[in-house]
Image (spheres, rainbow, N blue to C red):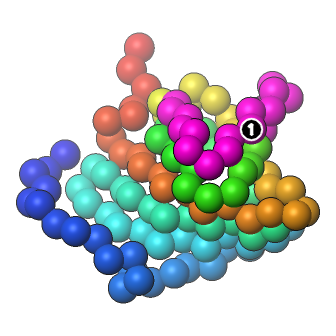
Amino acid sequence: MSNIPFQAIDWTLVKKDQYKGETGTAYWQTIQFSGLRIRLVEYSKGYLADHWCQKGHIVHCLEGEFVSELSTGEKIKLIKGETYVVSDELSSHRSITGAENHVKLLIIDGDFLKHTQ
């Protein structure tokens, strides 16, 4: 990872990309550094990810609530103020929001979450 000089991020100036889920929509605003990605992500009401993710993340719930479903069938609910962390390749997970709420997340991932034996 490279050295990152001090900087403030004005998220209102960061382009918002739209990704369709199996149902609903995800909106990503992404800041990319060498070996580090920081995203502000919003999932619409009724969002279901269209893939199982094996990437490691630090996910902090800023608004609303959502469920991380693991491929094992386990479901972990996160609400505003809660965080989860997982390294690369240690789970297959996908995000789900309820029909009545959206969610806003801060997601950080990068080389520091690579799985090591």
Percent across and percent down for residue 108 are: 42, 49
Whether residue 99 sits left or right of residue 49 in the image: it is right
Residue 95, can we see it?
no
Percent across and percent down for residue 12 are: 41, 83
What residue is shown with label 1? 77
- The vertical placement of 26 against 35, above or below, is below
- Residue at 64 percent across and 29 percent down: it is 91
The quarter of the rendered structure image containing the C terminus is top left
Whether residue 95 sits left or right of residue 87 in the image: it is right
- The vertical placement of 4 against 30, above or below, is above
- Decide whether residue 79 is among the magenta residues: yes
Which residue is most to the right? 99
- The vertical placement of 76 against 16, above or below, is above
Q: For mark 1, does the 10 Å Cα neighbourhood hold few (<14), some (14 to 19), or many (20 or more) residues?
A: few
- Residue at 32 percent across and 77 percent down: it is 10
In the image, which residues are magenta?
68-86
Which residue is most to the top? 117
- Residue at 57 percent across and 39 percent down: it is 82
Q: Label 1 is placed on what type of residue?
A: Lys
